[in-house]
Amino acid sequence: MSLILQALINGLVSGALLAVPAIGFTAMFAVLRFPNFSVSGIATLGAFAGYVAYGAGLQVVGSLAVAFVIAGAVGLVLDRVAHLPLVKQGALPAAIASIASGLVLENVVRLGFGNDLRGYDRPIARDMHIGDIRFSPQQFETMAVALAIMLAVFAALAFTRIGKAMRASADNPELAALKGIRPQRIAMMASFVGMGLVGMGGMLLGLDSSIDPLTGTRILLSIFAAAVLGGLGSPLGAVLGALLIGIAEEGAVLAVGSAYRAAVGFFAILIVLSLRPRGLLGERAF
Amino acid sequence: MNRLVGRRTALLSGVAAVAAPSVLRAQGEPIKIATLTPLTGAGGSYGPVMAKVAKAVVDEVNAAGGVLGRKIQLVSEDDQTNPDAGVRAARKLIDVDKVSAIVGTWASAVTTAVAPLCWESKTFLCTVSGADSITQLPHQGYLIRTQPNTVLQITRTGDFLVSLGAKKIFTLVPQAPFAQHSIEIMNGVARKAGGSHGGLIYDDKKTTYRTEVDQALRFGPDAILCAGYMPDTVVLLKDLYRAGYKGKIIGQAYAINQKLIQQIGQNEVVEGVYTYAPSVAEGSRALERVKKMSGLSDPDPYTSQVYDHVNMVLMAMAAAKDTTGTAIKDNIRKVSQGGGKAVDNAIDGIKAITAGEKVDYAGASGPCDFDDKGDILDCKFRYEQIKAGKPVLVKIA
């Protein structure tokens, strides 16, 4: 029993970290209407940008801000140059182009930093125990940061003009344009914020483990599965999806063995697409 | 009649004139061999220097006149420590470059994927991968490996743990061709010594192993074998430390090394951790050459093994007076074992072979003698323990 409870807690922690890039991914889909797979490269870039900032003496929050800005800016440029010109031909060409730009980014990072593993120079502490259950103070810290980021995103979507404009544009681009919301501006905003979140997600996931040029590629499937599970285009759905994927991945270790973790993501996508293609919360639920 | 003969002679000489340049061309054409090493991915810290040393051997032999009067051209590709990428690169090497031998495949999953392409195209493959299943493939002799197989490696590691007093051993191993077999072999070793054993196969792409570590610790082990690669082992060791595990830990030296220590950045996390590795031929002249070629004061076993691969392949060509993969297959054991003049590099070997002598190569990684399946017959192991952030030699045995 305590084994299951422990796996549940571990799953919630990793799910919370996964939720940050998943929100970014799904928000971009809502506005730009194509799955942007360059999140793999952007997550890696964010992780390395944060790593450099952290090494230069910034604290975790400051480094996250650096990761956000750099990942957002690069993501925005890639969207403008490589992806959005193809969206007119359909979502698929743009999605394929985004796979390519993800690969390019990964290798640009490799060119600059090499293949070596790097770790944030954070002290590693022993866990605390409450009965049979282990808690890692650091992982809860990281989780708290992730939750704070999510809250900020939802507050911005709910209360700020630009957030409301983004939601309106995602809901009905033509109507939003009629109301004077400039779709171009919203698209740029979505690219920047979405990719910024992905970049922060890359750093958050790397904080307690380690980073290398393949960091983003390793989590790409989980991000995609979380977004699909929650309903592509729904930020709240992405959070729910990420938590469920996190728990399912940890639960899979107990149920079928750790080696089948990768199957969890594919299995989730398969079930959602065949039983409830809109995802848990539907496509455009806020 | 005379005119007829004259015409025939003229025709013949014409044919000869057309044919001659192509014959000359063939003689001048370089012999192509390839390295397929992980320049990126989990093996990315080994592949580049492996390719560098292979190139150095080829340059050296070319400077001494090449093989059979022809220069050797080395093509280097990246397998990205990934079977898909490895197969794509091997296809290019085989179909486009038409190499006669590929050396240096590192990860067992990559070698397993690439090997069928090699034996089907009669391309010779030398690998440093350890999974038992590799030499059990129907490779028809087109494969040798210089790395001891899983049985040898895990048995020696298990014996070492038992000699340290371990009674309850747990094996944590990533999903790889050697995974299940590693667990079974360690199980046998532990039980034979009167102890018990548990094991778990994990996914090496996870960012946390808390649940896996929980499962391992529930077994109450006094020694844990972490048989993974470096990226996953970093996470695993951190999570074992966080969980408060204080027993023995042992892992492959390719995963637990100076880079890992530096990466973890906190000495008490890795304090006392043991490592094992097939040992290089300490004190041999070949190893000294590898040191010079690689620029490393302490070359790893894979770099030493690739040095041996290239030397043996080139000597086998000289012994066969032919450069095809099949010629290498049929002659590699004639230059690697069975007595004769002891040589430790291809230049001396080729000279001796040209002079009609039988040679027996022993290189930087060891004696390099192979059984019929392509496994090496003998190899020493090197055990180290990390103390205050530095690996300290325990023994070579």
Image (cartoon, coloured by chain):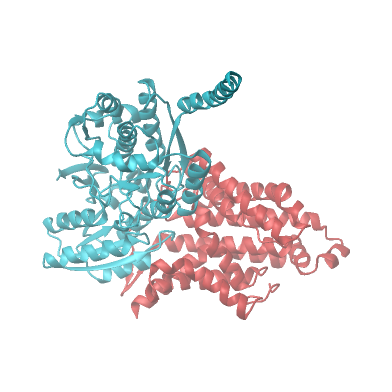
In this orientation, does residue A58 appear?
Answer: no
- The percent coordinates of residue A49 (x first, y second) are 54, 45
Toward the front, the furthest residue is B1
Residue A57's place in the image compared with A83, above or below, is above
Q: Is B81 left or right of B356, judged from the image as shown?
A: right
Identify which residue is drawn at 42% across, 54% down.
B116
Identify which residue is drawn at 45% across, 70% down.
A249
In this orientation, does residue A60 appear?
Answer: yes
Q: Is A47 left or right of A228, judged from the image as shown?
A: left
The quarter of the image holding the C terminus of chain B is top left
- The percent coordinates of residue B88 (x first, y second) are 51, 49
The quarter of the image holding the N terminus of chain B is top right
Identify which residue is drawn at 53% across, 69% down.
A266
Q: Identify the chain drawn in red.
A: A
Quarter where residue B162 is shown: bottom left
In this structure image, what is the colour of chain B?
cyan
- The percent coordinates of residue B65 (x first, y second) are 37, 21
Front residue (pair A10, B64) = B64
- The percent coordinates of residue A213 (x first, y second) are 50, 48
